[in-house]
């Protein structure tokens, strides 16, 4: 997040989105397996390309670059848009 460029998004791996994914799902989702509708690439969300800025995160498929999901937040609301994500699979928390 570059204060000199207010619209700039930092591009990192999906692990950097872990805190925002925790906010959405209430658990660590970086190990969840995501399948892309566009190229059928399947990998952990940690493997996705994350574009982060102050407004939220966009997760992109590492296989083709299409958007898997977008999470935006403001003081008034939260918005989760499922883009080209056909499946998100994870194991239950061990108790």
Image (spheres, rainbow, N blue to C red):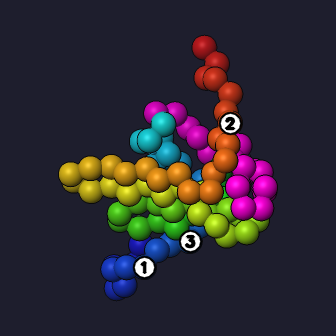
Label 1 belongs to which residue? 8
Say whether residue 87 is magenta.
no
Q: Position of residue 90 (x, y in %)?
A: 67, 33
The quadrant of the image that shows the N terminus is: bottom left
Crowding around mark 1 (Cα neighbors within 10 Å: few <14, some 14 to 19, many 20+) is some
> Of tags 2 and 3, which is closer to the observer?
2
Q: Secondary structure at mark 3?
A: strand
Label 3 belongs to which residue? 11
Q: Secondary structure at mark 2?
A: strand
Q: CA distance from mark 1 to mark 3?
A: 9 Å
Q: CA distance from mark 1 to mark 2?
A: 31 Å
Residue shown at the point (21%, 53%) measured from the top left: 75
Residue lying at the far left in this picture: please name it.
76
Q: Which residues are magenta?
A: 26-43
Q: Is residue 32 left or right of residue 81?
A: right
Residue shown at the point (67%, 43%) measured from the top left: 87
* In the foreground, 65 or 7: 65
């Amino acid at each position: 997040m570059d204060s000199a460029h207010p619209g700039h998004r930092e591009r990192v791996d999906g692990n950097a989105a872990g805190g925002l994914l925790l906010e959405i799902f209430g658990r660590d989702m970086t190990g969840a397996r995501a399948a892309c509708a566009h190229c059928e690439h399947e990998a952990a969300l940690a493997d996705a390309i994350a574009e982060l800025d102050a407004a939220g995160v966009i997760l992109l498929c590492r296989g083709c670059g299409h958007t898997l999901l977008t999470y935006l937040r403001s003081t008034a609301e939260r918005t989760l848009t499922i883009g080209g994500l056909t499946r998100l699979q994870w194991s239950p928390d061990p108790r």
